[in-house]
Image: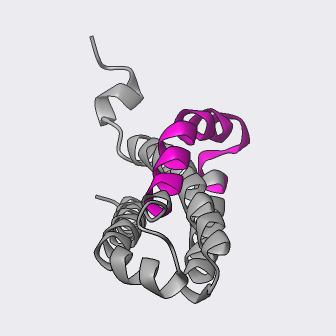
Amino acid sequence: MTGRQLTVLVVLLASRFVMAADFSILNVTLPRVGVDLGFTAGNLQWITTMFALCAAGCTLVFGRVGDYLGRRRIFVAGMVVLAVASLIGGITTSPALLLVARTLQGLATAAITPAAMALLTTAFTEPAMQKGDYP
Protein backbone atom coordinates (compact mmCIF):
# COMPACT_ATOMS: atom_id res chain seq x y z
CA MET A 1 0.00 0.00 0.00
CA THR A 2 1.41 3.36 -0.97
CA GLY A 3 1.53 6.38 1.33
CA ARG A 4 -1.22 8.06 -0.67
CA GLN A 5 -3.45 5.01 -0.38
CA LEU A 6 -2.87 4.82 3.35
CA THR A 7 -3.75 8.51 3.72
CA VAL A 8 -6.92 8.07 1.66
CA LEU A 9 -7.92 5.05 3.71
CA VAL A 10 -7.36 6.80 7.06
CA VAL A 11 -9.27 9.93 5.99
CA LEU A 12 -12.20 7.93 4.63
CA LEU A 13 -12.37 5.71 7.71
CA ALA A 14 -12.24 8.76 9.96
CA SER A 15 -15.08 10.38 8.01
CA ARG A 16 -17.24 7.26 8.38
CA PHE A 17 -16.48 7.21 12.10
CA VAL A 18 -17.51 10.87 12.49
CA MET A 19 -20.79 10.29 10.66
CA ALA A 20 -21.58 7.13 12.64
CA ALA A 21 -20.66 8.78 15.95
CA ASP A 22 -22.84 11.79 15.17
CA PHE A 23 -25.86 9.60 14.48
CA SER A 24 -25.24 7.36 17.52
CA ILE A 25 -24.65 10.20 19.95
CA LEU A 26 -27.88 11.92 18.97
CA ASN A 27 -29.91 8.74 19.34
CA VAL A 28 -28.56 8.19 22.85
CA THR A 29 -29.16 11.79 23.93
CA LEU A 30 -32.45 12.29 22.07
CA PRO A 31 -34.71 12.21 25.16
CA ARG A 32 -32.58 14.76 26.99
CA VAL A 33 -32.30 17.01 23.94
CA GLY A 34 -36.06 16.91 23.53
CA VAL A 35 -36.63 17.97 27.14
CA ASP A 36 -33.98 20.70 27.06
CA LEU A 37 -35.25 22.25 23.83
CA GLY A 38 -38.95 21.84 24.55
CA PHE A 39 -39.90 19.26 21.92
CA THR A 40 -43.19 17.52 22.53
CA ALA A 41 -43.17 13.72 22.58
CA GLY A 42 -44.91 13.68 19.19
CA ASN A 43 -42.40 16.02 17.57
CA LEU A 44 -39.24 14.47 19.00
CA GLN A 45 -38.97 11.98 16.13
CA TRP A 46 -38.47 14.85 13.67
CA ILE A 47 -34.93 15.35 14.97
CA THR A 48 -33.95 11.98 13.54
CA THR A 49 -36.36 12.03 10.62
CA MET A 50 -35.01 15.28 9.15
CA PHE A 51 -31.53 13.77 9.04
CA ALA A 52 -32.69 10.45 7.60
CA LEU A 53 -34.91 11.97 4.91
CA CYS A 54 -32.17 14.22 3.60
CA ALA A 55 -29.43 11.59 3.84
CA ALA A 56 -31.45 8.88 2.09
CA GLY A 57 -33.23 11.10 -0.37
CA CYS A 58 -30.25 13.03 -1.69
CA THR A 59 -27.46 10.44 -1.80
CA LEU A 60 -27.94 9.60 -5.48
CA VAL A 61 -28.23 13.26 -6.41
CA PHE A 62 -24.96 14.13 -4.69
CA GLY A 63 -23.30 11.09 -6.26
CA ARG A 64 -24.12 12.53 -9.66
CA VAL A 65 -23.06 16.03 -8.59
CA GLY A 66 -19.73 14.52 -7.53
CA ASP A 67 -19.31 13.07 -11.01
CA TYR A 68 -19.59 16.57 -12.48
CA LEU A 69 -17.88 18.75 -9.88
CA GLY A 70 -15.28 16.31 -8.57
CA ARG A 71 -15.55 13.71 -5.85
CA ARG A 72 -12.80 15.15 -3.68
CA ARG A 73 -14.36 18.61 -3.83
CA ILE A 74 -17.80 17.24 -2.84
CA PHE A 75 -16.25 15.13 -0.07
CA VAL A 76 -14.39 18.10 1.45
CA ALA A 77 -17.41 20.41 1.12
CA GLY A 78 -19.60 17.77 2.76
CA MET A 79 -17.20 17.39 5.68
CA VAL A 80 -17.11 21.17 6.18
CA VAL A 81 -20.92 21.40 6.11
CA LEU A 82 -21.16 18.44 8.51
CA ALA A 83 -18.77 20.09 10.95
CA VAL A 84 -20.54 23.46 10.83
CA ALA A 85 -24.00 21.88 11.12
CA SER A 86 -22.83 19.75 14.06
CA LEU A 87 -21.52 22.85 15.80
CA ILE A 88 -24.81 24.67 15.20
CA GLY A 89 -26.77 21.67 16.45
CA GLY A 90 -24.60 21.42 19.55
CA ILE A 91 -25.00 25.04 20.63
CA THR A 92 -28.59 25.71 19.58
CA THR A 93 -31.29 26.57 22.06
CA SER A 94 -34.11 26.54 19.52
CA PRO A 95 -36.02 23.49 18.23
CA ALA A 96 -36.29 25.04 14.75
CA LEU A 97 -32.56 25.68 14.52
CA LEU A 98 -31.84 22.12 15.63
CA LEU A 99 -34.05 20.81 12.82
CA VAL A 100 -32.20 23.04 10.34
CA ALA A 101 -28.88 21.71 11.64
CA ARG A 102 -30.07 18.11 11.34
CA THR A 103 -31.23 18.81 7.78
CA LEU A 104 -27.81 20.19 6.90
CA GLN A 105 -26.16 17.17 8.53
CA GLY A 106 -28.33 14.86 6.42
CA LEU A 107 -27.42 16.74 3.25
CA ALA A 108 -23.73 16.62 4.19
CA THR A 109 -23.96 12.88 4.79
CA ALA A 110 -25.67 12.49 1.42
CA ALA A 111 -22.74 14.30 -0.20
CA ILE A 112 -19.99 12.49 1.73
CA THR A 113 -21.20 8.91 1.32
CA PRO A 114 -21.04 8.50 -2.48
CA ALA A 115 -17.96 10.69 -2.76
CA ALA A 116 -16.14 8.58 -0.16
CA MET A 117 -17.08 5.35 -1.90
CA ALA A 118 -15.92 6.71 -5.26
CA LEU A 119 -12.64 7.94 -3.79
CA LEU A 120 -12.10 4.56 -2.16
CA THR A 121 -12.70 2.60 -5.36
CA THR A 122 -10.46 4.86 -7.41
CA ALA A 123 -7.63 4.85 -4.86
CA PHE A 124 -7.51 1.06 -4.66
CA THR A 125 -7.60 -0.44 -8.13
CA GLU A 126 -6.31 -3.76 -9.36
CA PRO A 127 -2.85 -3.40 -10.96
CA ALA A 128 -3.84 -5.85 -13.71
CA MET A 129 -6.84 -3.73 -14.60
CA GLN A 130 -4.68 -0.63 -14.88
CA LYS A 131 -2.37 -2.36 -17.34
CA GLY A 132 -5.23 -3.85 -19.32
CA ASP A 133 -4.20 -7.44 -18.46
CA TYR A 134 -7.67 -8.61 -17.52
CA PRO A 135 -9.99 -10.90 -19.39
Quadrant position of residue 95: bottom right
Front-lying residue, 101 or 18 = 101
Quadrant position of residue 134: top left
Instruction: Measuring from the top left, give residue 44's x and y in whole percent.
Output: 44, 65
Whether residue 49 is in magenta: the answer is yes
Instruction: Measuring from the top left, give residue 32's x and y in whole percent.
Output: 37, 84
Q: Is residue 128 left or right of residue 108?
A: left
In this rendering, the answer to whether 49 lies above or below 101 is above
| Main SS category, magenta section | helix
Front-lying residue, 77 or 103 = 103
In this rendering, the answer to whether 92 lies above or below 63 is below
Q: At 28% across and 58% down in the image, what residue appears?
A: 1
How is the model colour-coded?
one colour
Instruction: Measuring from the top left, give residue 120's x and y in whole percent.
Output: 40, 48
How many labels, in total? 0
The image quadrant where one finds the C terminus is top left
Q: At 71% across and 35% down in the image, what residue appears?
A: 68
Q: Is residue 80 left or right of residue 44?
A: right
Q: Is residue 90 left or right of residue 67?
A: left
Whether residue 93 is in magenta: the answer is no
Q: Is residue 127 left or right of residue 46?
A: left
What span is colored magenta in the figure? Answer: 47-73
Q: Residue furthest right?
A: 69
Front-lying residue, 1 or 115 = 115
Q: At 59% across and 73% down in the image, what residue appears?
A: 98
In this rendering, the answer to whether 73 lies above or below 37 is above
